[in-house]
């Protein structure tokens, strides 16, 4: 394992030896209760490098039996973890924040190797991920209640918040570290035990994180990690067991719907962080140069594979030519390549299916009359690369304005009127993030209030912030992660009716 104190913060990047050492440093087994153990199935789960198609490593491939063993371990540890002093829980998370920060080069390299995005994006993710542990370390000691006199007198109302119990945490591949820390931090701070089920494309990051948390003092059974190539049966078995009390899911709306339906039988607490279709509105009074940089960040970070990615760029007609010209130049100048190479700004998509989906959306928009300003094609090389792409004049019926693109493609639509653009922005089943660029404060607040989204970024290209409540409305889900609200998703309210005659 790389020691940043000895090797410097970037020592893990850039060489085949460093890559081998990073993948070799990660445990490949399941973590259940007190031990690392093999899965009950004989076969392994191969992890692919999306920039080459080559196998990086093989990890254990859990079955439903392993999932239930993980739930049993979480169940057995629940009572003692709930009784562990909040300060102790918080200090473990704080140590994990520090460990992740110190280990950022190795973790970023792991993310880049199995997910594909450039190292700079992965390093950003490591910082974002660590910050959830810092935040929840601080929140662990603030799960307060209330004490009130009953309005009629003669009694008191005591309200307390208690851990909901064992939680199943299901995460996607696009931010494999941050989506895990955002859930684990809240669950552990609240006093809940957990089973982490990472995406099958990115198990190495999750296993490395699990080891760090154990090293930092998370007791046995409090965090259990199961990697699997067949999540449906495993998750269904765990969710059907009455010992589970909550499921927190980040992923697609389609899978979210399945899990919401499955949660009914045990009446589970449910948090859903689902897909998005973020509008990016640039008004005529905006700082165009800043809006272009914001669009590059909102569109291209994480290869465009982010739930908050700007999916539809609505540009006021007066500035549309200037904006298009500048953004075309920025995207055309982006260096595409393997995420580990110096200077690379965008990497491969996660797999062939993802690249095929992006290609279909671009061909569909073209057929309907959109103009390719730059890019527009898959790249003839190993790995799942697609060119950074700008499409101008995208018609309202193009599929990419309805579906998540999840790739480095920016569709541009010109608008004339504030009310019309708000209507167009809201014409989607999703409601996760939205972006506004304007220098008019009245317009900024008016439009922010009218947009149907859980999060609105004003004159900036990101909403990521551990101290803010992250989440969506409509088909983008419910529940919030981060902020003062995040820990509340893992706490059940109990009220005690006290007789206290005057
Ligand atoms: P996905 O296919 O829905 O998978 C997400 C997770 O669910 C993975 O761990 C996956 O395991 C698991 N899964 C798949 N089918 C399942 C089933 N039948 N039962 C139980 N679990 C199942 O999504 P993805 O492609 O990994 O991620 C992209 C999506 O996530 C996008 O829609 C994106 O917008 C969304 N997302 C949302 C947020 C947010 O905070 N709102 C953040 C990031 C991403 P396998 O990997 O084994 O299939």
Image (tube, rainbow, N blue to C red):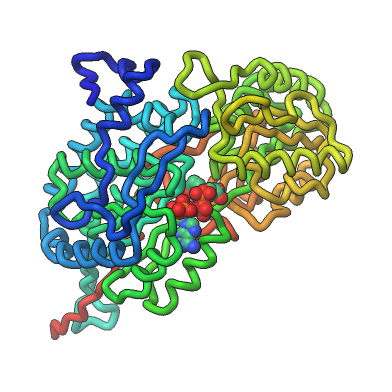
Tell me if residue 383 can be seen.
yes
Determine the residue positioned at 39% across, 26% down. 123
In the image, is 198 to the left or to the right of 87? right
Q: Quadrant of residue 92?
A: top left
Determine the residue positioned at 48% across, 68% down. 260
The percent position of residue 18, horizontal first and vertical second, equals 32, 20
- Image vertical order of residue 154 relative to residue 222, above or below: below
Tell me if residue 250 can be seen.
no
The percent position of residue 477, horizontal first and vertical second, equals 52, 59
Determine the residue positioned at 30% across, 50% down. 184
- Image vertical order of residue 243 relative to residue 291, above or below: below
- Image quarter in which the C terminus is found: bottom left
Determine the residue positioned at 13% across, 48% down. 87
The percent position of residue 322, horizontal first and vertical second, equals 78, 20
Q: Quadrant of residue 177?
A: top left
- Image vertical order of residue 225 relative to residue 118, above or below: below
- Count of numbered tags: 0
Give 474 or 142, whichever is nearer the viewer. Answer: 474
Q: Quadrant of residue 407?
A: top right
Give 345 or 92, whichever is nearer the viewer. Answer: 345
In the image, is 117 to the left or to the right of 204? right
- Image quarter in which the N terminus is found: top left
The percent position of residue 232, horizontal first and vertical second, equals 45, 64
Give 399 or 476, whichever is nearer the viewer. Answer: 399
In the image, is 88 to the left or to the right of 254? left
Give 470 or 14, whichever is nearer the viewer. Answer: 14
Residue with the most extreme front position? 42
């Amino acid at each position: 394992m790389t020691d940043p104190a000895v090797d410097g913060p970037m020592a893990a990047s850039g060489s085949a030896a460093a890559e081998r050492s990073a993948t070799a440093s990660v445990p490949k087994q399941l973590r259940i209760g007190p031990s690392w153990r093999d899965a009950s199935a004989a076969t392994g789960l191969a992890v692919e490098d999306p920039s080459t198609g080559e196998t990086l490593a093989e990890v254990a491939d859990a079955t439903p039996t392993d999932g239930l063993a993980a739930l049993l371990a979480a169940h057995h540890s629940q009572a003692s973890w709930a009784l562990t002093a909040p300060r102790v829980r918080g200090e473990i998370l704080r140590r994990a924040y520090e460990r992740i920060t110190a280990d950022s080069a190795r973790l970023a390299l792991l993310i880049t190797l199995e997910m594909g995005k450039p190292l700079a994006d992965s390093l950003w993710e490591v910082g974002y991920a660590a910050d959830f542990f810092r935040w929840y370390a601080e929140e662990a000691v603030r799960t307060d209640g209330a004490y009130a006199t009953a309005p009629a007198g003669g009694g008191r109302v005591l309200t307390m918040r208690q851990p909901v119990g064992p939680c199943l945490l299901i995460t996607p591949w696009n931010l494999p570290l941050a989506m895990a820390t955002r859930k684990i931090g809240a669950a552990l701070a609240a006093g809940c035990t957990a089973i982490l089920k990472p995406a099958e494309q990115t198990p190495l990051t999750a296993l490395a994180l699990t080891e760090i948390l154990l090293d930092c003092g998370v007791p046995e059974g409090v965090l259990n990690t199961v990697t699997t190539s067949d999540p449906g049966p495993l998750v269904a078995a765990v969710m059907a067991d009455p010992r589970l009390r909550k499921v927190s899911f980040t992923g697609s709306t389609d899978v979210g719907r399945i899990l919401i339906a499955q949660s009914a039988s045990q009446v589970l607490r449910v948090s859903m962080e689902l897909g998005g279709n973020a509008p990016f509105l640039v008004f005529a009074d905006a700082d165009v140069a800043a809006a272009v940089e914001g669009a590059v960040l909102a569109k291209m970070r994480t290869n465009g594979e982010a739930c908050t990615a700007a999916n539809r760029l609505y540009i006021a007609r007066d500035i549309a030519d200037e904006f298009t010209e500048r953004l075309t130049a920025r995207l055309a100048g982006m260096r595409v390549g393997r995420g580990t190479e110096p200077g690379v700004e965008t990497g491969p998509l996660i797999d062939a299916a993802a690249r095929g989906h992006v290609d279909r959306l671009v061909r569909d928009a073209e057929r309907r009359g959109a103009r390719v300003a730059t890019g527009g094609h898959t790249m003839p090389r190993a790995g799942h690369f697609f060119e950074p792409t700008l499409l101008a004049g995208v018609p309202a019926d193009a599929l990419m304005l309805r579906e998540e693109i999840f790739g480095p493609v920016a569709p541009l639509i010109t608008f004339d009127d504030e009310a019309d653009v708000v209507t167009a922005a809201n014409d989607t089943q999703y409601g996760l993030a939205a972006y506004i660029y304007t220098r008019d404060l009245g317009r900024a607040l008016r439009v922010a209030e009218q947009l149907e989204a859980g999060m609105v970024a004003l004159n900036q290209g990101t909403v990521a912030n551990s101290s803010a409540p992250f989440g969506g409305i409509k088909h983008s889900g419910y529940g919030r992660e981060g902020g003062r609200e995040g820990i509340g998703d893992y706490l059940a309210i109990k009220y005690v009716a006290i007789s206290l005659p005057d």
